[in-house]
Each structure stands twice: as C-alpha cells, then as structure tokens.
Image (cartoon, grey):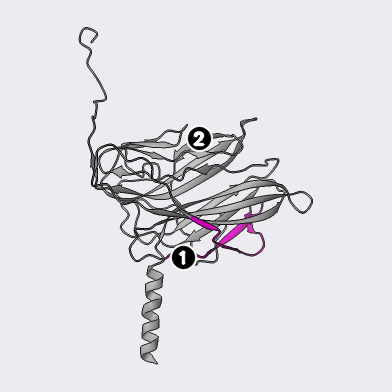
Amino acid sequence: MNKTLTIFIILLSGFVAEAKHITGGEMIYDYLGPGSTVNSKSYRVTLRLFRDENCFNCAAMPAFVTIGLFNNNTNTQVGSYINVNISSSEQLPLNALPSCITNPPNLTYTGGYYTFTVDLPDNTNGYTLTYQTCCRIDGIMNVPDNVGATYTTQIPGGVFTDSSPRFAKGISVVCYNKPFTLDFSATDPNGDSLVYSMCSALNGGGAQNASYANPSPPPYGSLSYINGFSGGTPLGNLASINSSTGIISGLAPDAGKYVVSVCVNSYDRATGNFIATHRKDFIITVAPCDFAGAQLQPSYISCDGF
C-alpha cells in the first residue's frame, strides 16, 4: 500500500511539473449578430494558446480550458465558469530565415484553439473574458521563475458591434546580438485603426497549475521584470516597436527566452472613438545563431557632397 502511494505521489509531482508548457496566447472575439434574447449580442470567442514543441518534459496542449466571464459594469462574474474543449490545432508558420544564417535554431510551435459562442445582454461597459494558468517555463531572461499567465479580452459595451483585432501567427528567428524584426502586426475585421505598444505581460493570479478552474475578475497584476528589462523594453533598450505597424525591430539581446507582450488599441474607423485594448503574450526565443550582413553606421560624413 505504501509503495503504491509513493508511486502515485511521484507521478502526480511529475504531472504538476509538466504543467509548464504554454509559450503564449491571446483571446479574440467575433460579433455574430443580435443575440437570442431582446437587447443582447452574440459573439464567437476563441482562446489561442501556443506551445513550444521542443519544450523538454512538458505537458500536451490542454484538452480543455476554463474561462471566466465578468460584467464590467459591476465587476462580477456572469453565470458559471465556462469549460471549453479544444476545437482544433495547427503548426504555426515559420517566417523567412535571415540570409546566410549559421547554426539556425529548430523552432516548432503549435497553436491550440478553444472556441465557443455566448450571448451577452447589452450593457454600458462591456464584458471581460479570462483564462489564467501556471506556469511559465523556468530560466526566462527577463522575468522570474514560477510565474503564471493571464490571457484576457474585453468586449466593448454600448453601441459597438465589434470584432477584435487578431495578431499574426508567424514565428521569426532571432539571433543574439544581431539586427532582427518580429512581426506583431494585427488585422482588424472591421477595418478599425490600430495603435501598438509593448506592455507588461500579466501574471497568473491565483493559478497554481495548468488546470486552474477559478479565473478571477479584473484588474490583473503584471509580471515583475528582472535584469534591467521591463514591459516596455522586454528585449532591451536597443529594440522598439513601430506604433503603426506592430513590427518590433532593433538589436537582439543575449541568447535565451524572453516574455514579450504587445498591446494594440483599436479606434472606431468612422468616429475615431476608442474601442478596446487587445494583447498578445509570447515567449520569444533568441537563439545562438549568426548571419552575414552589412551593419551600416547610423551617421555619415559628407565630403564635397559625396
């Protein structure tokens, strides 16, 4: 009996450790039309989770997730927690490699999608939907070990019949201490104006494992950054984001893993009014690779006009 119990505890401990498997995520929504009841709207909500297939001793993509729905008028939960089975999965595309790259990394990521529909009564301030989980992998360069993640979206209230932006899925190779670009651009189904910024990633709240079933209402806490990094400079002071395109570029930091979170504010294409903030959180791999290429100096001297 004691031997059986010991084996069970060892297996359980291994499962908890393997909960460190999610590389990033975002939650999007699409307006479907009037709801089934008077003065309500129907939405399709999709949680996108990303998994690094080269992660050692990590759990598979969750078979289901638990999502909390909260009324922003009162900051209270609406109904019961929503359990959503995985709908589909796919391998994420790899963007073009830098020319003449040496020691290219093997980057393989899977996206898992959890989709459901919900009718929401009209209100003034809209709704928040949230998934929380623990834990991010250990050894990340810009945040401490043993921190979780919150993936959330805000559906606006009032007169808006909005579908959220959604970020590009492509994975880019970044070589340490070399020039790079990362595509964090998003498309908006409504053609609304988008403004990008790098922002602090969210922690996991009270989540203690990957099957955490009690997501909390907002507000949500941000990660504490280490080693001189911050939410606004998650890849160091030599990298920045174009607020109009969502492209991050600059000089990469040392090799390692880095949490990068990008927020995009959407503004109504007709009125210019602010709609909502959408975010994507992803653990970027900066690889010990190299590539040939000219690195021009940022300033020049003109001699007789030449």
Residue drawn at 26 percent across, 48 percent down: 255
Residue 96 is covered by the magenta coloring: no
Res 60 quadrant in image? bottom left
- Position of residue 33 in the picture relative to residue 211 (left or right): right
Amino acid carrying mark 2 in the image: Val
Image quarter hosting the N terminus = bottom left
Amino acid carrying mark 1 in the image: Ala
Residue 86 is covered by the magenta coloring: yes
- Res 195 label: 2
N-terminal of the pair, mark 1 or mark 2, is 2
x then y, percent, for residue 150: 49, 56
x then y, percent, for residue 121: 72, 52
Q: Is residue 1 above or below residue 155?
A: below
x then y, percent, for residue 200: 43, 47
Where does the magenta region start and end?
Answer: 60-89
Q: Mark 2: which secondary structure?
A: strand
* Label 1 Cα neighbours within 10 Å, binned few <14 / some 14-19 / many ≥20: many
x then y, percent, for residue 298: 27, 25
Inter-mark Cα distance, 1 to 2:
32 Å
Residue 72 visible, this orientation? no
Disc 1: which residue: 210
Q: Mark 1: which secondary structure?
A: loop
Residue drawn at 37 percent across, 91 percent down: 2
Viewer-proximal residue among 2 and 57: 57
